Image: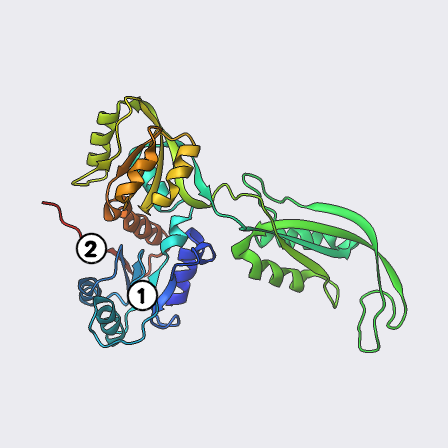
């Protein structure tokens, strides 16, 4: 199996098309055509993680956080980022990161937090926008069913909990081919009218190349007329953060102790207690202060995230309990998720979970 084939599997879990614009995801170091000897899964790629990969004969590191976040103008070994890249290149080790693509995935970072906390009735906290596309095309009536089925097989026509969705309108199309044309119906140089069906069908943004490839390969016309638009519909299974409910409501202090123990953190920084039970809980792995208003709007009793600044806690405004559990702590189970996913998909070589603790923060 080659690196690019492993990446294709990981894109089933978290398509890179849904990475945030500011992010740097994908294959960061290495050749996608390299044959994989072993995979090491980690939260961060540090020098000692690369050493671990070398020791365990893993030439692909799957890292949640990207070691290269902004552009590198020099690779001289002066920074930890440069040293990691140097060592990886020297030992022919590829590095892949899916960061915010996995943040936005329905079965990603935030799903793991929800699972650990036992949250039910989950939904996306901040749905990602402009992720649903619509294709409109025109096809001879006798070929419409074949084309629809091909597009369905390619992944089009899925909306929320429904699949094989399309809208079909009967009509009459006209065309006249020039001297270089090779029309399927009618004759070149003559105006022809054909009974056609206009097919409207939606699909997820990351499937566009495959959908259009299928359209062109299946459509009978020499020239395919089609339109692609972006819809405003929210994708209920894609976006930042999640919100769910505890099976049983907890008193605030009890909830904070439960949170501390479950997320294995040395410290929970929280806003003022409100003397209200905690039932509805919003979560967002990593730096989540931008989602405080969304958590409040969704009616969360508590919002769990990390990297809150001093003034962020004022935004609670006596409506929600804000709990900062630490960046690493909020995402620590992500590597377990990636490891378990790849183990199910790959049996031909080792998929190992890194034993290196990459948390840069210590508590006194």
Residue corresponding to mark 2: 358
Find residue 74 and report its image quarter.
Answer: bottom left
Q: Quadrant of residue 57?
A: bottom left
Drawn side of residue 237 relative to residue 315, left or right: right
**Mark before the other along the chain sequence, 1 or 2:** 1
Secondary structure type for disc 1: loop
Q: Answer few, some or many: residues within 10 Å of disc 2's Cα (few below 14, many 20 plus, some between 14 and 19).
A: some
Q: Quadrant of the C terminus?
A: top left
Disc assigned to residue 256 = none
Q: Viewer-proximal residue, 97 or 35? A: 97
Tag shown at residue 68: 1
> Looking at the picture, does residue 327 appear above or below residue 247?
below
Element on which disc 2 rests: loop
Task: Answer yes or no: is residue 1 visible.
Answer: no
Q: Nearer the viewer, residue 167 or 6?
A: 167
The CA distance from mark 1 to mark 2 is 16 Å
Quadrant housing the N terminus: bottom left
Give the number of marks.
2
For the point 31% across and 60% down, the residue is 62
Percent x, y of residue 103:
38, 49
- Above or below, 27 against 140 in this view is below
Which residue is farthest left? Answer: 364
Look at 87% across and 66% down and name the residue there.
186
Whether residue 42 can be seen here: yes
Left or right: residue 296 versus residue 150 is: left
| Left or right of 342 on screen, residue 106 | right
Q: Residue visible at 80% across and 66% down?
A: 184
**Residue 179: where, in percent of width, then height?**
84, 78
Up the image or down, 189 lies above or below 359; here it is below
């Amino acid at each position: 199996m080659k690196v690019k084939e492993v990446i294709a599997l990981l894109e089933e879990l978290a398509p890179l098309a849904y990475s945030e614009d500011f992010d740097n995801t994908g294959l960061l170091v290495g050749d996608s055509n390299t044959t994989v000897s072993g995979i090491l899964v980690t939260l961060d790629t540090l020098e000692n993680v690369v050493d671990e990969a070398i020791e365990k004969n893993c030439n692909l590191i799957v890292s949640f956080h990207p070691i290269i976040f902004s552009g590198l103008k020099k690779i001289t070994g002066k920074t930890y980022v440069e040293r990691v890249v140097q060592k990886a290149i020297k030992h022919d080790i590829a590095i892949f990161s899916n960061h915010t693509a996995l943040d936005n995935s329905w079965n990603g970072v935030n799903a793991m937090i929800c699972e650990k906390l036992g949250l039910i009735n989950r939904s996306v906290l901040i749905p990602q926008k402009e992720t649903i596309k619509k294709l409109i095309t025109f096809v001879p009536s006798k070929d419409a069913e074949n084309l629809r089925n091909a597009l369905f097989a390619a992944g089009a026509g899925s909306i929320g909990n429904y699949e094989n969705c399309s809208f079909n309108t009967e009509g009459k199309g006209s065309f006249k081919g020039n001297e270089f044309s090779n029309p399927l119906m009618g004759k070149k140089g003559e105006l022809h009218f054909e009974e056609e069906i206009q097919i409207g069908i939606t699909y997820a943004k990351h499937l566009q190349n495959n959908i259009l490839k299928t359209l062109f390969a299946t459509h009978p016309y020499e020239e395919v007329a089609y339109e692609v638009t972006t819809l405003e519909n929210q994708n209920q299974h894609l976006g930042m953060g999640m919100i769910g409910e505890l099976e049983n409501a907890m008193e605030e202090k009890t909830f904070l102790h439960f949170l501390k123990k479950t997320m294995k953190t040395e410290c929970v920084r929280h806003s003022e207690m409100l003397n209200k039970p905690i039932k509805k809980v919003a979560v967002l792995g990593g730096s989540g202060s931008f989602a405080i208003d969304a958590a409040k709007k969704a009616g969360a009793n508590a919002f769990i995230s990390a990297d809150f600044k001093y003034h962020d806690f004022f935004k609670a405004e006596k409506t929600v309990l804000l709990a900062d559990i630490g960046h690493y702590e909020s995402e620590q189970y992500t590597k377990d998720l990636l490891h378990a996913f790849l183990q199910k998909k790959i049996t031909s070589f080792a998929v190992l979970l890194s034993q290196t603790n990459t948390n840069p923060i210590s508590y006194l």
